Image: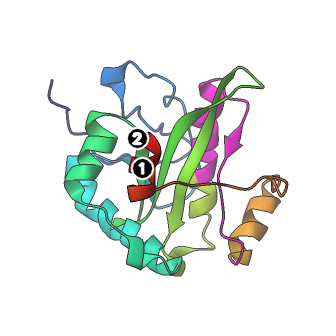
Amino acid sequence: EKRKSSSLLPVTSATVLVNCFKKKGRKDMEDLKTNVAGLTLKPVEKEDLSTLRGLLYELAEYEHLEDIFDVAEDVLEESLLIKHSAEAFLAIFEGKAVGYAIYFMNFSSFLGRAGMYLEDLYVKPEYRGRGIGLAMIKTVARIAVARNCRRFEWVCLNWNVNSIKFYKSLGAKPLDEWTTYRVTDEDLKKLAE
């Protein structure tokens, strides 16, 4: 089944962000609103992958991690549009892509239900301070609530004090007692043996 292309939808108090995964039967993105003049939130589709990849690279540069950046458009297409491993939308401000969010469901064994994990929330530096990031994170929070999640989590680099201040202003609490572990590439293959 071929995905139908959706047009840009201005996101105002009178307009709803439409479900980007209707073929999966998801209706939980309907009735979600935000109020930022000139802002459009557009679910990522195939024609957006080049733009998304460019924004991903900008985030890698901002985080000083461009040396590990290894994202191809065909991999994004497979992950986001075919396998639906995660969901993503672009923030279009006054006709220009200025940011994106990528998020997916996780699970809490202590709550016995799914939660929402925000992989990335990125707004170009020159567009920060206009409420765009807040509108984006609120949109993902609304999706989480619509899906009956009791947790909404993400990580932030310790040196990113502006983001930490922003997240704390939202009521987010750091989980200082936890350490994230990661196994990648060859170490992952070796572990899987």
Quadrant in the picture for residue 19: top left
Quadrant in the picture for residue 193: top left
The answer to whether 2 appears left or right of 28 in the picture is left
> What residue is rendered at 26% in x and 55% in y?
48
User: Given the image, on which type of amino acid does mark 2 rest?
Assistant: Glu
Horizontal and vertical percent position of residue 120: 52, 57
The answer to whether 38 appears left or right of 95 in the picture is right
Q: How is the image coloured?
A: rainbow
Q: Which mark is residue 190?
A: 1
Region of the chain picked out in magenta, as a range: 137-159
Figure quadrant of the N terminus: top left
Horizontal and vertical percent position of residue 122: 51, 65
Q: In terms of secondary structure, where does tag 2 sit?
A: loop
Is residue 94 something that shows in the picture? no
Q: Which mark is residue 193?
A: 2
Q: With respect to residue 25, does 192 lie above or below? A: below
Q: With respect to residue 95, does 33 lie above or below? A: above
Residue 48 versus residue 178: which sits nearer the camera?
178
Q: Is residue 162 magenta?
A: no
User: Given the image, on which type of amino acid does mark 1 rest?
Assistant: Lys
> What residue is rendered at 64% in x and 47% in y?
138
Horizontal and vertical percent position of residue 80: 33, 42
Residue 83 versus residue 185: which sits nearer the camera?
185
Q: In terms of secondary structure, where does tag 1 sit?
A: helix
Tags 2 and 1 touching, CB below 8 Å: yes
The answer to whether 77 appears left or right of 131 in the picture is left
Q: Is residue 149 magenta?
A: yes
Total marks placed? 2
